[in-house]
């Protein structure tokens, strides 16, 4: 996938790239190649945030070690065993930003 280069358009290109491929990075030093960091775990985590469901890989959460979502003890306090999901009574729109890959 080629990204057109414009003067001063680096940030716009990166934002477009993230919209199309979350977690992708544009490597200007390597000829403009695009790299995508994918979850390497099959361990899928299900979140229910204010009634909206989110799924992600546990490896994605652990890629941000300073986040409470990477802390198993923190997550255990919010786990609903009956539903097999983590529940947070929070705004789902804010949560989307929280789990967005780097």
Image (cartoon, grey):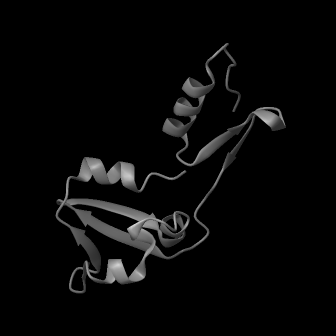
Residue 45 image point, x, y percent: 40, 72
Q: Position of residue 68 (x, y in %)?
A: 39, 69
Q: Residue at x 56, y 49 (%)?
A: 23
Q: Residue at x 17, y 60 (%)?
A: 51
- Screen quadrant of the N terminus: top right
Give the residue displayed 37% in from the left and 83% down from the top: 73
Q: How many marks?
A: 0
Point out residue 85 in the picture as x, y percentages from the top left corner: 28, 75
Q: Is residue 99 above or below residue 18?
A: below
Residue lying farthest to the top in this orientation: 7
Quadrant position of residue 53: bottom left
Given the current orientation, which residue lies at the most extreme front position?
A: 66
Along the viewing direction, whichever of 65 and 90 lies nearer the viewer: 65
Point out residue 9 in the picture as x, y percentages from the top left corner: 61, 19
**Which residue sits furthest bottom?**
81
Q: Nearer the viewer, residue 46 or 72?
A: 72
The residue at 25%/66% (across/down) is: 48
**In the rendered view, does 24 fall on the left or right side of 44?**
right
């Amino acid at each position: 996938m080629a990204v057109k280069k414009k003067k001063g358009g680096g940030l716009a290109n990166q934002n477009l790239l993230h919209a199309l491929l979350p977690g992708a990075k544009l490597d200007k030093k390597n000829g403009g190649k695009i790299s995508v960091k994918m979850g390497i775990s099959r361990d899928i985590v299900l979140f229910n945030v204010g009634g909206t469901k989110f799924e992600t890989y546990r490896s994605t959460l652990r890629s941000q070690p300073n986040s409470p979502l990477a802390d198993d003890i923190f997550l255990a306090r919010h786990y609903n065993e009956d539903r097999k999901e983590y529940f947070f009574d929070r705004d789902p729109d804010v949560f989307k930003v929280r789990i967005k890959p780097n």
